[in-house]
Image (tube, grey):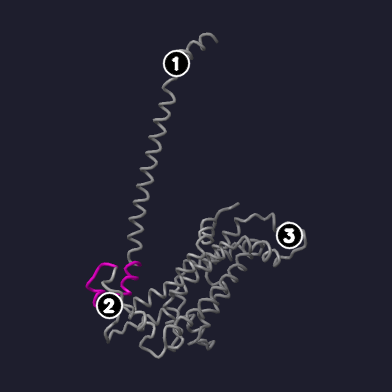
Amino acid sequence: MKTEIKQKKSNVDLSNLPENDLILRKRRIRRNKINAALRYTILAIVGLFMLYPLVWLIGASFKTNAEIFTSIGFLPSSFDFSGYVRGWNTSTQYTFTTYFANTFKIVIPKVILTVISTTLTAYGFARFKIPGKKYLFSILIATLLLPNVVLRIPQYLMFREFGWLNSYKPLVVPAAFAVDAFFVFMMIQFMRGLPKDLEEAAVIDGCNSFQVLVYILIPMLKPAMISVALFQFMWTMNDFLGPLIYLSSVEKYPVSIALKMSMDASALVNWNQIIAMSVIALIPSLVVFFLAQKHFVDGITTTGMKG
């Protein structure tokens, strides 16, 4: 039997095998290159469609008011910076410096309070055995389905009784009580995916619950905390209805309402000025996003994964 097997092996022509493997490998490489080229082409086309409004917005900020409605291209015939100068000065007694300062008076404390409160709340749900924790968590998830419009009137009446109208308190103080259930849920899911070995070792070494949170969990929660901060930063920067309801003094208005004030229906609207200020208003969110992009992607992709 062994001699017959050796004879059959000797009858097989092995000279063509390396050449066939080379041909198959070249075909595979060519197919992969074609697939990659198609993917990148489709992504480039889709990205162009998504970025074109932003590119047009930047180009339109350097156009005159008449050219905006007569030219569809994003490059102006001549760069006109008057939209930025006149738009920044506004038609009121306040410049956009005041409105940007007011915006950050709302955004910065709200982001800080949101990160702290959601981290503490998520820590309690994810690591402690609380009586009725399942029911409390179910109520928390149920609030995600509750429209914010339903709460506007009760909240307004409550803040009016507190004497907080025409101040930043209704926009900032609720963030200290983890009212954003989406952020709490995201932090809980991220925390559930973290191993408990280091926490148990820290408890054995004598750390209490607060020390475990500060020295063990928070360094590992950094991607999720940055994601929460980034979401809250962008949402608060774009918030229009909240300041419109609770603020009545022009000197306290944020950028979102200041832009709306520039569009006077009874007069000629200088769209180049409005677009120029819109471009400037986008810069903080874009800068913060690109600075925190790596941690933001890590926080989103690892949320819900269990280790």
For the residues bearing labels 2 and 3, Cβ distance under 8 angstroms: no
Report the predominant secondary structure element of the magenta stretch. Answer: helix
Q: Label 2's element?
A: loop
**Mark earlier in primary sequence (2, 1):** 1
Task: State how far apart marks 2 and 1 are (Cα).
Answer: 80 Å
Q: Which residue is mark 1?
A: 12
Q: Position of residue 15 (x, y in %)?
A: 43, 20
Q: Residue at x 60, y 57 (%)?
A: 192
55 inside magenta stretch = yes
Using a 10 Å C-alpha cutoff, classify the residue at mark 1 as few (fewer than 14 neighbours), some (14 to 19) or many (20 or more).
few
Q: Residue at x 51, y 56 (%)?
A: 301
Where is 172 relative to 290, above or below? below
Q: Which mark is residue 67?
A: none
Q: From the image, which quarter does the N terminus lie in? A: top right
For the residues bearing labels 2 and 1, Cβ distance under 8 angstroms: no
Where is 297 relative to 9, above or below? below
Q: Position of residue 140 (x, y in %)?
A: 54, 66
Q: Position of residue 241 (x, y in %)?
A: 42, 78
For the residues bearing labels 1 and 3, Cβ distance under 8 angstroms: no
**Closer-to-camera residue (147/169):** 169
**Closer-to-camera residue (111/279):** 279
What amino acid is at disc 2? Thr
Task: State how far apart marks 1 and 3 are (Cα).
Answer: 66 Å
Q: Which residue is mark 2?
A: 64
* In the displayed structure image, the side of residue 137 where residue 33 appears, left or right: left
257 inside magenta stretch = no
What amino acid is at disc 1? Val
Residue 1 appears in the rendering: no
Q: Which mark is residue 202?
A: 3
Q: Which residues are magenta?
A: 54-74
Using a 10 Å C-alpha cutoff, classify the residue at mark 2 as few (fewer than 14 neighbours), some (14 to 19) or many (20 or more).
many
